[in-house]
Amino acid sequence: MSSFIGKNYQAQGKLLLTGEYFVLDGALALALPTRLGQKFSISAGPADRLSWQSYDVDGSRWFSAIYDIPSLTILDCNEMEPTQRLQEIIRQAFLRSSLALDELAGCTVTTQLSFSRHWGLGTSSTLISFLADLTAVNPYALLEATFGGSGYDLACAQAAGPILYQNKTARNVVFQPLFADQLYFVYLGKKQNSRDGIQRYRALGEIAKDKLDEINKLTLDFVACDSLSEIEALILQHETIVSTMLDLPRAQDLYFADYWGQVKSLGAWGGDFVLVTSNRGDQETKNYFQNKGFEVMLRYKEMIL
């Protein structure tokens, strides 16, 4: 029987508050692990097979696949593209591991999200974290061989709280805004391919050191700020830098031009969640976004670990 059977694992989701895009070039970034994440469990299944079953937050099964072991040949699936992608990630993990693929024989892996898979909070990064742990390989090496990226999301997967992240190194940081009750996360529901944004950023060529220094300072200023007005000024400054360099409109200009607070994109611009500030009441703030058609809104303390 496989030594994997009975194993359970849990990884947190992620949000990138500062340093988006620039983190790829070694800028200091403030990253926030979420209370929501993905659980993984391994139970006994059919001999010589790996069964993989993934469930969304509402309990619906969104992914199902069966592989032959040890060949990893696909025997059955509900959708080919993610089945092939998982096949390649598993293959890459075992290529780097001292363990043999035979260890997966007779295993059923069940995954359960506590956030909607459409929210962009880390379905992929939690998977990489799990497989790296399972096979005892370097998660950043596995990420590089599969999805690519800066790796901040992997650091968030097992972080105990907010982190400062730079060049595959994370350190814990105290970031507990006294004004957290005036911070919200709003889901835009306009998912973007982050690779497109990265390609646009890469097209800029080498980023000047003074620009990276500016982002580094802003990140530390975010950590140190102690008032709503201060973080609003920092958000505007950060958004302006990214907007100017990538020639992309701010989310605030696109959707919330008449909003009284500040709106900050998180990670790939134009996609999933934005951070919003508000000096008005909870209901008035929620009403504003609901009237604009944005129904999903979470308080800072609901979202962040």
Image (tube, rainbow, N blue to C red):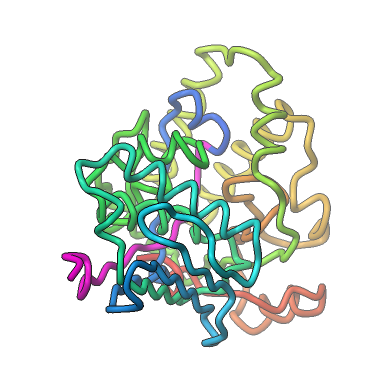
**147 with respect to 96 (left or right):** right
Query: Could you say which is closer to the camera, residue 15 or residue 212?
Result: 15
- Residue 15 place in picture, x, y as percent: 49, 54
What's the residue at 42%, 40% (across, down)? 143
Name the residue: 54% across, 29% down. Answer: 22
- Residue at 71% across, 64% down: 188
The range drawn in magenta is 1-19
Relative depth, front residue between 237 and 205: 205
Q: 232 or 154, which is in the foreground?
A: 154
Whole-percent x, y for residue 57 in the image: 51, 81
Q: Is residue 49 left or right of residue 25?
A: left
Quadrant that contains the N terminus: bottom left
In terms of depth relative to the viewer, which is nearer, 54 or 103?
Answer: 103
Q: Where does residue 296 sit, x and y in percent of width and height?
A: 65, 76
**Residue found at the far bottom of this picture:** 59
Q: Does the segment drawn in magenta span residue 64? A: no
User: Residue 305: x, y in percent?
Assistant: 35, 66
Image quarter for residue 199? Answer: top right
